[in-house]
Amino acid sequence: MTATPQFDGGSFQPGAGGVHIVRKPPPRRKGRWHELAVWWREIDKVLLSIVAALMMVGVIGVAAGSAASAHRLSTAETQLSDLHFFWMHIAYLVLGIGAMFAASILPRTSARRFAILLSAVMFVLLLAVPFVGAEINGARRWIRLGASFQPSEFYKPAFAVLTAWIMSWRVRDPQLPVMVLSGALLAVSCALLMLQPDFGTAILLCGVWFVLAITSGMPMKLIGWGAGGIVGLVVGAYFFYDNARHRIDAFLGGAEAYSQVDLANKTLTSGGWFGRGLWMGERKKILPEAHTDYILSVIGEEFGLIAVAGIAMLFCALVVRVLWRLAGEDDLFTLLAGTGLATLLGGQAFINMAVNLQLFPSKGMTLPLISYGGSSMIALCLTVGLLLAVTRRNPYLTRDGLPKGPRRK
């Protein structure tokens, strides 16, 4: 009696000497290189190129403004080198690029879950800022956990994705009160921000919410109520919020002559069309925050209004590219999340440029991906990473999810 051979995978094939077992090769494991290949295939390379261009502009701009800020902030005990903020900017930029890549490689579902979790964590920290936050320049916006960072900076992209997720519930049940829920989230978020005070970020979040409300197809009556609430927030801030009232009165009353905004505008236009040249600017030496809030003015003085117009065009290209990428998107959450994140980046850039052009009162808001900043730079790179994640698309699939094939004649 012969023993029956054990079969552990493969197939039977007849042969001259009997039956032979052909073993199947073990399945190839998909490692990190495969994930990177998929990421590179699906990522929006045009959007990535625009972001890289803005980052390069930021490196040059911070190099131009670093010496002026280093001289202003040096003391008898601490002398900062001319390129102190430049090297710090490079370090933060490297960390930001790492955060951007880590977020962009996430699938859309994972990116959404991460943003929702991030919003919950940062919301709790925003609640704690008025009590345990560090006060710098009269504002209490920073949390010190080993290193100082602004929870509001990380809350902004998380808020955009969270609001997009709430508004996308309408697809499952049109009767859900998504307008009320998202509006309540906005109201509480703005109240926490104005306690710091951070009126500029509160206005930015209002703008993101308003754009998402329109994009989601809300009835115009509800959108009108929401817009009225935002206007009421601004009016209420003027009468009951000293920080906002003082800035608005100074701006409208012309009292900002020789103030930061006035100095920024004069610095920006002093270089003419083509600028004075790198490190040849003079007015930047008396400009506060030359490497952060008013870096656009430094770029205008040293590289001219042509460079300023080029930066504005890059931000416009970023927003248009995202909207073009989302055109025809059938998933409401993806559409809203991409639109909200693009609005966040474009809106912050618009506010910063308007302040430098003396069109808005001072807001204390950086120019995305260009200004020097620690938590601000990392958070903005994270915003771009989430934007790249939600705009990823398999190039071999059509809109209906079917593989591309030869066209029928």
Image (cartoon, rainbow, N blue to C red):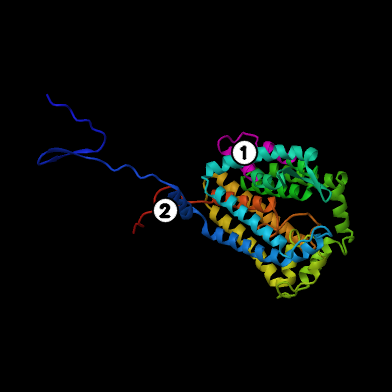
Q: Position of residue 342 (x, y in %)?
A: 62, 53
Q: Nearer the viewer, mark 2 or mark 1?
A: 1
Find the residue positioned furthest to the left. 16
For this rendering, which residue is in front, 271 or 4? Answer: 4
Q: Position of residue 253 (x, y in %)?
A: 89, 59
Q: Of helix, strand and loop, which one carries label 2?
A: loop
* Label whose residue precedes the other's in the sequence (2 or 1): 1
What amino acid does circle 2 point to? Tyr
User: Range of the magenta residues?
Assistant: 160-188
Left/right of residue 323 with respect to residue 17 in the rendered view: right
Q: Quadrant of residue 217?
A: top right
Q: Is residue 223 above or below residue 291?
A: above
Q: Position of residue 71 (x, y in %)?
A: 80, 64
Are there few (<14), some (14-19), or many (20+) residues within 10 Å of tag 2?
few
For this rendering, which residue is in front, 251 or 26? Answer: 26
Q: Is residue 172 magenta?
A: yes
Left/right of residue 81 with respect to residue 396 in the rendered view: right
Q: Is residue 157 magenta?
A: no
What amino acid does circle 1 point to? Leu
What residue is disc 1 on? Answer: 117
For this rendering, which residue is in front, 109 or 327? Answer: 109
Examine the rendering and report whether any part of residue 195 can be seen: yes
Q: Which mark is residue 137?
A: none
Q: CA distance from mark 2 to mark 1?
A: 32 Å
Q: Which mark is residue 396?
A: 2
Are there few (<14), some (14-19), or many (20+) residues within 10 Å of tag 1?
some
The structure residue drawn at horizontal position 77% and vertical position 54%, both measured from the top left corner, is 364
Left/right of residue 304 with respect to residue 336 in the rendered view: right
What secondary structure characterizes most of the magenta part?
A: helix
Q: Of helix, strand and loop, which one carries label 1?
A: helix
The structure residue drawn at horizontal position 73% and vertical position 41%, both measured from the top left corner, is 189
